Image (cartoon, rainbow, N blue to C red):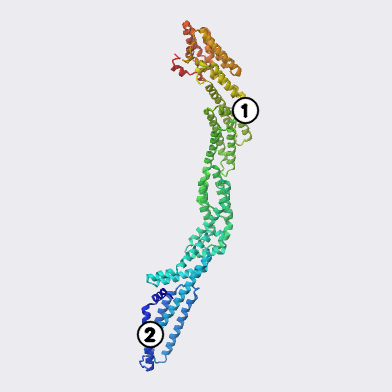
Amino acid sequence: MNHDDVRLIEELNGQEALERARQDAEADAFKFVSDSISNSSNLESLEQIKQTVFNKHQNKIAFLKARVQGIVTNIETGINDLVEISTNLTNLKSDIKSIEEESSSGVVVLDNFKILQGLATIWERAIIIDELMESFKTADDTIEMISKYFDENEKAFSIKLFTTIESLIDFENDLLTNVDDIGLKRYVQSRFEKVHQCREKMIDNVHDCLENALEQNVDQLIRANWIMVAIDEHDKITEYLRSAITRQTYAKMQDIDRNNVSLYLQKLSGMIETLPEQLELLIPALPSDINALELTTSYINTEIYKMLVNYKDSMPLNAALIDAMIKCMKDIECTLNALLGVSPSHEFYELCGTLQNTFEVILFEDYQKFLDNIISLDIDSVATKRDGMYYTPGPKDLIDRLFDAYNFVKGSVSNVVQGARPKLVNKLADAFVNLTNSAADSWDMKYIMAMINNSVDAVKQIADFAKANEDIIKTTEEIKKLQRPWSDMKNRGLPVLAQIIYSRAVSCDDDFRSDFEGRIDAISEALSDVSKHLFQPLYKKLVSVVTRELVPHYIQSFFMKSWEKPKTQEELESLITSECNALADMFSNLEQLLCKGSIETIEAFRDFMIEPYDVLHDIFHIIAKEYNDFTPGLAMALLKLRVDVKDNKSDYNECWSAFEMMYQNVDQSRGDSYFNQENAAKKGILK
C-alpha cells in the first residue's frame, strides 16, 4: 500500500476519529479487566441497560451500513470480493445478539458496553480499510486487464466489457464524491485514466461497426446497438446505419465512369434492388422502436436524393443527362413500390418534375448547339470528290442531327415527341439558312464553290430523307422549307463567286485601260480553274454571271481619269472595236448561249461609241434593257467621250430626249446596281 492509498483511506474513514477511538478502547479495555477482577457492582436496571446498549449498537449499525453503502454503491458485480462486506456485517449482528444475551443474565457492567463500542469501532474501521484496499487492488487488476485486452484487440467491444468499464467508472465517481482534497481527487482520476481511454476506444469501435454495418454480422450489430442505447446515443443509430448504406453505395459506384451517364445512373438505380438483402441483416439487430423501412426510405430520400442532385450539379447539363436522371428516378420509384411498398419523398418527386419540365427546353438548346457547331466547323471541312468537285459534309450532318434528335426524343421517358417534331424540323431549316449565309459572307472562294455544289446535293438529300422518314417530315411544305435555303444558296452564291473572281483578276476598273489583255486573260484563267471544281451546269451559270458583272466595269473604265482619250474618232473606234470584239469572242467561247445578253450588250456598247447619232437611241435601249441602271444620264456621259461630239452638238442634244423616251420602256423593277451611279455623280460624270 503506497502513501496515496493510505491518505485516501484516512480521508474516507477520518484519521482523527480513528486514533481517538483506538486510545479510548485501550483505556477502556484496561479498566474493564481491572474492574472485572475487583468485581465492581455498579449496576443498573437490566431493561434500561439492555435498551441503551441495543439503541447504541443499532444506531452504529445503521451508520456503518450507510457509510459502506455510500462507498461501494454500483461497484461492478464482477468484483465479487466486495460481497464479503455484507457477510462481516452479519457477523457483527451476531456479536450484538450475544451481547444482548449476556445482558439478559440480569447483571451487566455499564462500562463494558462503552469498551465494546470502542472495540467495535476499531474492528469496523479496520474491516473497511481492508475492504477498500482489496477493492483498489481488484479495480487496478481489472483496469490493467482491460487495457491489455484493448492493446491486443483494437476493434473489440462487448456488453460485458462495457458494463465492467461502466462499473469501474461508477466506483471512481463514488470515490470522488467522498473525497474533498483536490490532490486526492487528482490521484483517483489518474488511477482511472486508462478506464476512460478504454471506454472512448470501445465507443469508437461501436461507431465504426455501425458505420460499416453491412460488413458485420447480426450478433455484432445487436451488441453495438445495445451499447449505443446504454450511452444515450439511441438517436444516432439511424444516422450511422444510413451512413453505412451510403458508404457501401459510394464504394460500389466508385469504379463506374461518371461520364458514362447511362451506366452510372443505371447502376445507382440498381442499388435500390439490394435493399431487401440489407434489411434482412439490419432488422434483427435494430432496437424495437427503429423501423427498418423508415430507415431505408430515409436513406433514399436523403443520401440517394443527395447523390442525384450532386451528380446533376457536377455534370454538364444536357438532354441526355436529364433523360437518364428521369429514367433513373422513375426506376427507383417503381422499385420502392414493388419491393418495399413505400414511396419517395416530396423533394424526390419535385426534383423529378423539375427535370421533366426542363427536358424540352434543354433538348432544343442541345440540338441548336449541335447545329451551330456543324455550321462553324463546316468552312474548315471542304473536301474534294474523285471528279475534283468541292463539297462539305455540312448538309448531311445537319440532316443526321435531325434524325438523331427525333429518335432521342422518341425514346426518352418524357412524352414530348409530337410537340417537339415540328420544332426540330424548323430549327433544321433555320440552320440551313445560317449555313448558306455563313458561306456567302465568308468571301472564301473554295468554300463558296463547295456550298454551291452542296446546293444540288442537299435538295436531293432532303427529298430522299423525307421519303424514308415520313414520321419526321410529314408535309410537302416542310420539304420545301428545308430545300429553299439551298436554292437561295445557288442564286446568291454564284454572284458572290463572280465578284471574287473579278476582284482578284481586276483590282479596279482602271486596269482595263492600263492592261486590257492581261485582265481578260486573268479572268479566263480564274474561270478555267473554277470549272475543275464546280458542277458543269453551275459553272455555266457562273460564266454568265461573271460576264454580266464584267461588262459594266469595262464600260465604266472609260470614265477613269488615268485614261488618255484618243485624239481622233477613228482611234477611239479602233480601240473600242478591238476590245469589244475580244470580249465578245471570250464570252462566246466560254458559254455562248448563257452569255448571249452580255455579248449583245458589249456589241451594243461598241456600236454606241461608233455609230451615227440618229440610231443611238435604239442602241441605248439594248443596253438599258439588259442593265436597267444604265440611265440616260450615264449614256450622255459616254457620248461625251466620243471625239466627234464637238462636231455634232445638235445631234448630241437631241439624244437626251430620245434616251429618256426609250428608257421609259425599260423594266426598272429589278433594281439593278451594276453601274456605280453614286461614284459617277461624285466625279461629275453625270449631269
If the image is split into quadrants, where does the C terminus sit? top left
Between residues 633 and 340, which one lies in front from this camera angle? 633
Q: Position of residue 494 (x, y in %)?
A: 56, 24
Which residue is denoted by mark 2 in the rendering?
25
Lower position in the chain sequence, tag 2 or tag 1: 2
Eyeballing the image, is 202 above or below 357?
below
Q: Disc 2 on helix, strand or loop?
A: helix
Element marked by disc 1:
loop
Q: Residue at x 55, y 54 (%)?
A: 251
Q: Nearer the viewer, residue 395 or 105?
A: 395
Image quadrant holding the N terminus, namely bottom left
Q: Is residue 593 visible?
A: no
Indicate the position of residue 663 as horizontal and vertical percent values.
50, 14
Residue situated furthest bottom in the rendering: 38
* Residue 80: % across, % down: 50, 75
**Front residue of this view, candidates 69 and 204:** 204
Residue at the spot 52% in from the left edge and 28% down from the top edge = 441
Judge whether 656 appears above or below 157 on screen: above
At label 1, which amino acid type do we have?
Gly
Q: Look at label 2 and name its amino acid.
A: Ala
Question: Label 2 crowding class (10 Å Cα cut-off): few <14, some 14-19, many 20+?
Answer: many
Q: Is residue 299 above or below residue 108?
A: above
Badge 1 density bin: few <14, some 14–19, many ≥20, Cα 10 Å: few
| 434 to 21, vertically: above or below | above
Residue corresponding to mark 1:
388
Give the Cα distance between marks 2 and 1. Answer: 133 Å
What mark, if any, has residue 488 been given in the picture?
A: none
Q: How many marks?
A: 2
Can residue 207 be seen here? The reply is yes
**Residue 637 percent across, percent down from the top left:** 47, 12
